[in-house]
Image (cartoon, rainbow, N blue to C red):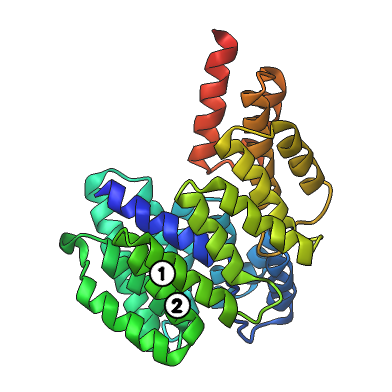
Amino acid sequence: MKCKVGWIVAILTAWTVLFCGVSIASSPIVEEARALVDKRQDSEAEPLLLEAIEEDAQEHEAYFLLAKIHLRRQDHKTAIKYAERAVKIDDSISEYHLWLARSYLAKAMESGMINAFRYARRGKGQYEKALAADSSNTEARFELCMYLVAAPGMVGGDKDKGIEHATILEAQDQLFGAYAWAGIWEQDKEFEKAEASLRSAVVLDTSSAHYAMYALGFFFERSERYDEAEGVFKEILEMKPDDMGALFQVGKIYILAQRNLDEAETHFKRYLEVDPGPNAPDWAAAHWRLGMVYDLQGRTDLALAELRKAVEMAPGNKEYQKTLKNVGKKKKG
């Protein structure tokens, strides 16, 4: 089960980082905080949001934004707490249910089998509530589709229903339909069909953020087709030289392929010099990746320094903690 949940979370993580949430009318202090969250200035936004809920315990968007902050930090327990509070105050907002679903699935990934089952079922239920609140929520429908085709039947997986959602998505939004079919084909190991769907998405995508190209690059990463993934992200950089997300991904590919490590080091150092933007990995992720580069280069002290920064910035991230522990063992050895 954990392997299945892991696949779902891996797929959804690769996609959901590309999409931003909707804005909800709220108080001026929460609007200010929302703008900061959209820029990933979470440390500045958090005290404003805590102040807002201290002044008004029914300020549901403040709880929702706190949930987003903690999910990004991979503090899944706290993200769930805040998202559940937002939903309890106002269960009519589709976006709240969507992010609670994401929080539950992320928690499932780090849990033992029994709790993984429990959180996975809750996640599916929240996707369904998100669609009940707003049937046009394409992100929720897409993610539910991916869940249904990947999850085992004991936690609500149902490939036929997943295909039904893909068909609805195709009618609602051709681009999201292409994403959905790509996910279905990938799960079925029909990799040529998955790639074809993503390439059609690239043609359909008119956004300046190149979301579909990112999706294609992530697909190549998951397939360990590193040269092709590198080519996609370098193409994005040619069109948009200041796209920090693409720069990050090129560095990540070099780590996965264990080559061009000096270039990877340069990429992550450059990444840490500027604001990466709202849809790119945060600085904690960059410190983690830079630490991995140093580790592969045999520069253990530098690796530990970067990994400690990553853990300090995102203390709830178990993957960062695990990497730090493993590199620390090398130092002791």
Residue drawn at the location 41% of the way across and 56% of the way down: 9
Can residue 182 be seen in this snapshot?
yes
Tell me which corner region of the image, top left, top right, bottom left or bottom right, holds residue 100: bottom left
| Numbered mark located on residue 182 in the image | 1
Note whether 57 is above or below 108 in the view shown: below
Which residue is the extreme one toward the top?
333
Q: Position of residue 284 (x, y in %)?
A: 66, 44
Which residue is the extreme one toward the left?
154
Q: Secondary structure at mark 1?
A: helix
Q: Is residue 24 left or right of residue 148?
A: right
- Distance from disc 2 to disc 1, alpha carbons, whole Å, reads 6 Å
Can residue 99 be seen in this snapshot?
no
Residue drawn at the location 69% of the way across and 39% of the way down: 287
Q: Identity of the amino acid at label 1?
A: Ala
Q: Position of residue 84 (x, y in %)?
A: 42, 68
Q: Secondary structure at mark 2?
A: helix
